[in-house]
Image (tube, helix red, strand yellow):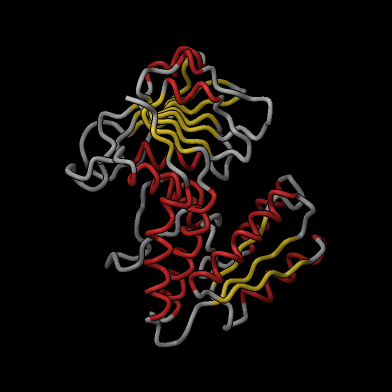
Amino acid sequence: MPCKTLLASGIAAKFTEELRSLIAARADGPPTLVGFLANEDPFAAKYAEWTGKTCEETGIKFELRRVDRESLEEAIVDANGDVRVNGIIVYYPVFGDRQDQYLQNVVSPTKDVEGLCHQYCYNMYHNVRFLDEEKQRKCIIPCTPLAIVKVLEHIGVYNSILPYGDRLHGKTVAVINRSEVVGRPLAALLANDGAKVYSVDVNGVQVFSRGPGIALARHKVAEVSEKAEEVLPLCDVVITGVPVESYKVDTSTLKDGVVAVNFSSYRNFPDSIKQKASLYVPSVGKVTVAMLQRNLLRLAEYQHM
């Protein structure tokens, strides 16, 4: 069978329509999202542009605030205390080091639409899916990892017949990226849903796995000696996010019928992927923005609970 290419715009469409309906039905009007841009990164500027355009389409109020990086922390604190602001997004990198991690924790958990603060990261890695014992408030999950999960659900990688929390049982996945923003959180999410995940980066390969049973247990991580070219042939799904234009996956190492998903700003798969894959998703950006808006609506609801 020929490879089918699925565009992020088509996958995001159902989420955008759902968001539009939910926002129109809100008694207290549309929620407000504030974005902070404190760098000259063209990809960050493009992401901010996508955010504004999609917010306009769905009816969300979006305000982009351009600030210098030295005043960013104070600007975030002000937005934390502003009752008119329902959600905050910071377009990284700002300093490009641990100070960015500090800024992620300056954003209040009540307004963190990106799910990058310590509370949400801790819950995600420990497979804690709710903020309360009554299970009324779901945790906020980082937008791009959540977008990739939704892409995999859309294309049928998740098996909806299986119990919640085990719908990737029997699947083997490679994630070529282990950044703290996308790659490692994504590997944890997929492992927590039952997959065996090979996490690949320049430092080697790790395996994320949850173990037997469908209980929502925390995943485990183990170092392995295998190289990427040895584990890729084992994988049903290969997900790439290498932020280097020259990097390309060697498609000869992939199994026939593999599902290929790319979240890098660059195309990590060469054109030959269409001769190897059954399904190919070249980007997830528009789904990421939809998930950001979904997180915003959830936080706006929690603020009134």
Provide residue 75's location: percent of width, then percent of height. Answer: 73, 71
Provide residue 280's location: percent of width, then percent of height. Answer: 44, 34
For image coordinates 47% across by 85% down, the residue present is 29
Residue lying furthest bottom in this view? Answer: 27
For image coordinates 29% across by 64% down, the residue present is 135
Please tell me in which quadrant of the rendered image residue 112 appears.
Answer: bottom right
For image coordinates 64% across by 63% down, the residue present is 106
Provide residue 109's location: percent of width, then percent of height. Answer: 52, 65
Please tell me in which quadrant of the rendered image residue 161 appears.
Answer: top left
Q: Nearer the viewer, residue 172 or 127?
A: 172
Provide residue 93's location: percent of width, then percent of height. Answer: 71, 49
Q: Nearer the viewer, residue 176 or 51?
A: 51
Please tell me in which quadrant of the rendered image residue 242 appears.
Answer: top right
Relative horizontal placement of residue 133, taking residue 24 as reference (left or right): left
How many marks overall? 0
Relative horizontal placement of residue 113, taking residue 187 as reference (left or right): right
Q: Quadrant of the N terminus?
A: top left
For image coordinates 36% across by 31% down, the residue present is 209
Residue lying furthest front in this view? Answer: 2
Q: Is residue 189 above or below residue 245?
A: below
Q: Quadrant of the C terminus?
A: bottom left
